[in-house]
Amino acid sequence: DADVTQTPRNRITKTGKRIMLECSQTKGHDRMYWYRQDPGLGLRLIYYSFDVKDINKGEISDGYSVSRQAQAKFSLSLESAIPNQTALYFCATSDLFSYEQYFGPGTRLTVT
Amino acid sequence: DAKTTQPNSMESNEEEPVHLPCNHSTISGTDYIHWYRQLPSQGPEYVIHGLTSNVNNRMASLAIAEDRKSSTLILHRATLRDAAVYYCILGPYNFNKFYFGSGTKLNVKP
C-alpha cells in the first residue's frame, strides 16, 4: 500500500461548487503539505502543517482552506471553485528529522 | 526569496553520465540545496540534498561550488528510467519555503 494516498485521483466540478481533496499518510510523519502544479510549471506551496494544531499559509493560499483532522489526515478545500484552480494537486509529508518530502500520486482537478 | 536557474531541457544517452546544472547566485547561508525529480504522471521524489560539501548517495552525486552560487546534480549512468523533470530547490531544512521552479526536463536516449 502507498505511504501517501490522495482521494479522489481525478475530479471534474463546476464553477462555484465546494470541493474537498483528501490526503492520508501511513508514514507517521507530523508534517504535511499541499502543493498545486500547473501545466509546464513546478509545484507551488498552498498550505503546510507541522502538527495537528499548526496550520500555515504557503505561497498561494487565497481561495483555499485546509483542515488537519489527525496526524495522518490533511484535507484541502476549495470553498467556491473557479476555473483557474484547474490544476494537479499534490500532498506531501515529511518527518521532523529528515530532509526528504514524500509525495502522493496527485489529484487532477478540473473546474468547468 | 532565493531563486534557481536551470536549463529548460537536456538530453543524454543511456549509460552515459549526466550533469544537470543549477545557478543560485542569491542563496543565503542557511539555504540547503535540494534536488527532486518528477517522473511522468507521478509526484516528485527526493534525489539528494546538501549544504556546503559535495554529497553522494545511491541515486546521484551533488557537487556544490565553493561559493555556493551554483551546483550540479550528477547521474553517473543514465537509464531510461531517469527521464524526468529535475528540480533544484533552495530552502531551509523545514520546507516551509520550498519553491520548485520549472526544472530541467531530461530526455534519455537509448
Image: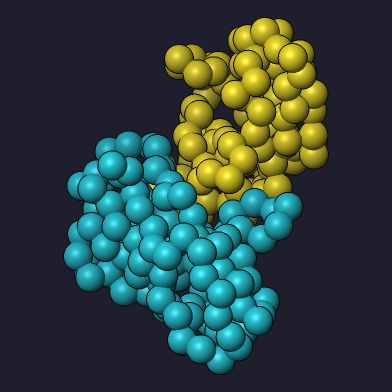
Chain colours: A cyan, B yellow
| Residue A83, visible in the rendered structure | yes
What is the quadrant of the C terminus of chain A in the image? bottom right
Name the side, left or right, on which A54 lies relative to A14: left
User: Residue B3: x and y, percent?
Assistant: 67, 48
Q: Position of residue A29 (x, y in %)?
A: 25, 48
Q: Quadrant of the N terminus of chain A?
A: top left
Number of numbered markers: 0
Q: Is residue A46 left or right of residue A32?
A: right
Q: Along the line of sight, which residue is nearer the eye, A10 or B92?
A: A10
Image spot of residue A109 (x, y percent):
56, 69
Q: Quadrant of residue A6?
A: bottom left
Placement of A52 over or under A26, stated as above or below: below
Q: Position of residue B76 (x, y in %)?
A: 61, 10
Up-down: is A74 above or below B64? below
Residue closest to the far bottom: A16
- Can residue B50 be seen here? The reply is no
Left or right for A19, reference A97: right
On screen, residue A93 above or below B39? below
Instruction: Between residue A31 and residue B85, name the one nearer to us.
Output: B85
User: Residue at image x 55%, y 62%?
Assistant: A108
Q: Nearer the viewer, residue B42 or A38?
A: B42
In this rendering, is residue A85 above or below A51?
below
Which residue is depicted at the point 43% across and 47% down?
Answer: A103
Residue under the point 61% across and 72% down: A110
- Residue displayed at 66% across by 37% down: B85
Q: Nearer the viewer, residue A20 or B105?
A: A20
